[in-house]
Amino acid sequence: MRKVFRNLQLGIAVEMDTREVYPKDPGMGTPVLVTFSTGDTGTWNCVTSEGETSDGYKLSKDQLNWLETVRPKVEEWMQENGV
């Protein structure tokens, strides 16, 4: 099951995908991916803890604030799907 939260104005989306959940190998896959209109991507944990992607795209304050507004829904999805 795939679920997506988007903010077109900020050019950011959070994509959650149960096909990327591997309970026997939790380090495998990317169940929660943050994508940007620039083509940059980052894992939920990296983007929310570092404020940037592993490739160096720095999130704006508005993008970080928006991620905080969807955090409860993302964390609920993660808990429901064993992430």
Image: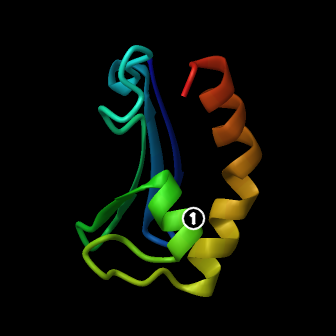
Figure quadrant of residue 19: top left
Estimate the x, y position of residue 82 in percent, counting from the top left: 57, 20
Which residue position holds label 1? 48
| Residue drawn at 36 percent across, 60 percent down | 42
Q: Quadrant of the N terminus?
A: top left
Colour basis:
rainbow
User: Do we see residue 22 in this rendering?
Assistant: yes
> Badge 1 local density, few (<14 within 10 Å), some, or many (20+)?
some
Estimate the x, y position of residue 60 in percent, counting from the top left: 53, 85
Q: Quadrant of the C terminus?
A: top right
22 relative to 34, above or below: above
| Residue drawn at 66 percent across, 66 percent down | 66
Q: Viewer-proximal residue, 45 or 69?
A: 45
76 relative to 56, above or below: above
| Residue drawn at 62 percent across, 85 percent down | 61
Amino acid, disc 1: Thr
Estimate the x, y position of residue 32 in percent, counting from the top left: 45, 41
User: Do we see residue 8 in this rendering?
Assistant: no
* Secondary structure at numbered mark 1: helix
Q: Viewer-proximal residue, 14 or 9?
A: 14
Q: Viewer-proximal residue, 74 or 12?
A: 74
Estimate the x, y position of residue 62 in percent, counting from the top left: 63, 80
Question: Would residue 70 be found to the left or right of residue 78 on screen?
Answer: right
